Image (tube, helix red, strand yellow):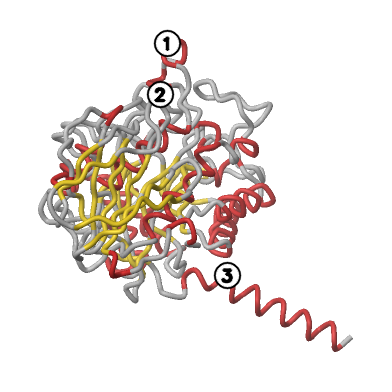
């Protein structure tokens, strides 16, 4: 009996260590150069997100565990989810039969509902995942022409609710706070004040601004508006900016990323809702069909190379946790449990592998690396570099010329990285001066490639061999 007790103790200790390891470097904060996210001790953190908006509302414990485990295996690091969910989240009970609020009053949370949220946040941490937590979806402030609502938030109760939920999760290391929820603040309304009030409440609840890394999730807006930065860039609570691209194909979101990247003061920026995999393109499946893995990959590499600190993937069937027997939103047709293995979901690990294979924090966007810097989105060539390496993404495999000498070293080692398979092929060594033309192994629709250039003296490991 003692032997079994001792064995159980060892198992529990190992399980505890595994659960704590992903956050052993501390909760997340903005890097000292104001461009990236890092842990408290400065360890870089790459945001590879998934939009699981209905996670807390529609999945039970066993389903959520299956979801977390698979996403962790695929290399995801962040799950974006909503406490007061979009799909009639106030009046339709969660998977355990509980509603989030008593009488739809945000000052009266239902303990039973939030115990389920507690459990899922804990299990996310055990699987090494950060929860980007939206306290509410935006329709609870502004129903607009879609969304179930009802509209329940005011400046006063938003602060109370923010304080309550902040206090509840103040000791969770794996939470990033996201205000908003697919809504643009209306001109002449109290919307901006409500979101600011909720953010202030969260900061009150967690014990101060330094304990609440925070952003805002907007609807798509124009280049000149710049996502969340239009309303909140100078607010101290907004630690990094978010964009949404609108689920259309080949939108020049890289220009929006660059616009926000160049705002002052500097703050990290991310496309937190790009085109979802298996989504009706521009909400018009009849004429434009459904998005595919290629559509999804292009946004990932173009956004990142334009200056984004990380990237969020999304799947149309997964954000709503579609399953047989549920009313599909905008034509969802694959059960969420099957959709987890769609092609782009499995290819996102290659994005992370590449970005983490070289020093992350000194990477900057740099279109001066290439002479073909202004191609349209479908054939875009986008460049980024660190001090001793560079990446160039060619969306359709078009050849391009590189202005050498932008990174250190007398010679550079060059490789082709395949975003479809994560494989790397050596090209050879080149003098780090003048111009050099590079022609990808293949070209055309679906044939995107990344050129890797390294200071040869650094002898960096191949991204295909990285964990």
Q: Nearer the viewer, residue 348 or 145?
A: 348
* CB within 8 Å, label 3 to label 2: no
Q: CA gap, disc 1 to disc 2? A: 23 Å
Q: Nearer the viewer, residue 75 or 389?
A: 389
Q: Nearer the viewer, residue 102 or 227?
A: 227
Q: Is residue 448 above or below residue 134?
A: above
Q: Nearer the viewer, residue 91 or 295?
A: 295
Residue extending farthest bottom:
2
Q: CA gap, disc 3 to disc 2? A: 39 Å
Q: Which residue is rendered at x = 61% and y = 50% of the image? A: 70
**Residue at label 1?**
287
Q: Is residue 391 left or right of residue 230?
A: right
**Residue at label 3?**
19
| Residue 150 appears in the picture as rendered | no
Q: Is residue 437 left or right of residue 443?
A: left
Q: Which residue is rendered at x = 26% and y = 33% of the image? A: 380
**Residue at label 2?**
146
* CB within 8 Å, label 1 to label 2: no
Disc 1 crowd, CA 10 A, few/some/many (<14, 14-19, 20+): few
Numbered disc 1: secondary structure: helix
Q: CA gap, disc 1 to disc 3? A: 47 Å
* Image location (x, y in percent) of residue 140: 39, 37
Numbered disc 3: secondary structure: helix
Chain-order first, disc 3 or disc 2: 3
| Nearer to us: label 1 or label 2 | 1
């Amino acid at each position: 009996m003692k032997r079994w007790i001792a064995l159980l103790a060892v198992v529990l200790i190992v399980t505890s260590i595994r659960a704590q390891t992903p956050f052993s470097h501390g909760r997340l904060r903005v890097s000292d150069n104001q461009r990236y996210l890092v842990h408290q001790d400065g360890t870089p953190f790459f945001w590879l997100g998934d939009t699981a908006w209905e996670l807390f509302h529609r999945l039970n414990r066993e389903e959520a565990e299956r979801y977390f485990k698979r996403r962790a295996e695929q290399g995801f690091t962040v799950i974006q989810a909503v406490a007061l969910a979009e799909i009639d989240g106030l009046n339709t009970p969660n998977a355990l039969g509980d509603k989030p609020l008593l009488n739809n009053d945000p000052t009266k949370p239902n303990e039973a509902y939030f115990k389920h949220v507690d459990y899922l946040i804990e299990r996310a941490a055990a699987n090494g995942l950060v929860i980007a937590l939206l306290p509410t979806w935006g329709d609870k402030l502004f129903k607009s022409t879609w969304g179930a609502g009802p509209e329940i938030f005011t400046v006063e109760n938003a602060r109370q609710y923010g304080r309550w939920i902040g206090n509840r999760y103040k000791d969770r290391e794996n939470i990033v706070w996201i205000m908003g929820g697919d809504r643009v603040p209306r001109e002449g309304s109290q919307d901006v004040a409500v979101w600011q009030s909720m953010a202030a409440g969260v900061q009150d609840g967690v014990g101060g601004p330094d304990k609440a890394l925070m952003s805002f999730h907007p609807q798509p807006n124009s280049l000149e508006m710049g996502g969340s930065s239009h309303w909140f860039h100078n607010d101290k609570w907004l630690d990094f900016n978010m964009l949404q691209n609108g689920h259309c194909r080949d939108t020049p979101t890289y220009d929006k990323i660059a616009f926000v990247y160049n705002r002052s003061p500097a703050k990290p920026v991310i496309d937190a809702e790009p085109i979802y995999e298996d989504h009706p393109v521009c909400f018009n499946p009849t004429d434009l069909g459904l998005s595919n893995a290629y559509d999804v990959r292009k946004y990932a590499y173009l956004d990142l190379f334009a200056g984004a600190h990380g990237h969020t993937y999304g799947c149309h069937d997964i954000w709503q946790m579609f399953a047989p027997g549920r009313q599909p939103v905008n034509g969802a047709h694959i059960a969420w449990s099957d959709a987890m293995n769609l092609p782009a979901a499995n290819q996102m690990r290659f994005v992370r592998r590449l970005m983490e294979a070289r020093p992350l924090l000194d990477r900057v966007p740099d279109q001066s690396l290439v002479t073909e810097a202004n191609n349209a989105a479908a054939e875009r060539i986008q460049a980024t570099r660190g001090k001793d390496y560079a990446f160039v993404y060619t969306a359709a495999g078009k050849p391009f010329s590189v202005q050498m000498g932008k990174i250190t070293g007398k010679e550079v080692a060059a490789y082709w990285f395949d975003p479809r398979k994560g494989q790397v092929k050596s090209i050879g060594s080149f003098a780090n001066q003048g111009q050099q033309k590079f022609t990808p192994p293949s070209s055309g629709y679906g044939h995107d490639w990344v050129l890797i250039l390294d200071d040869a003296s650094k002898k960096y490991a191949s991204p295909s061999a990285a964990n």
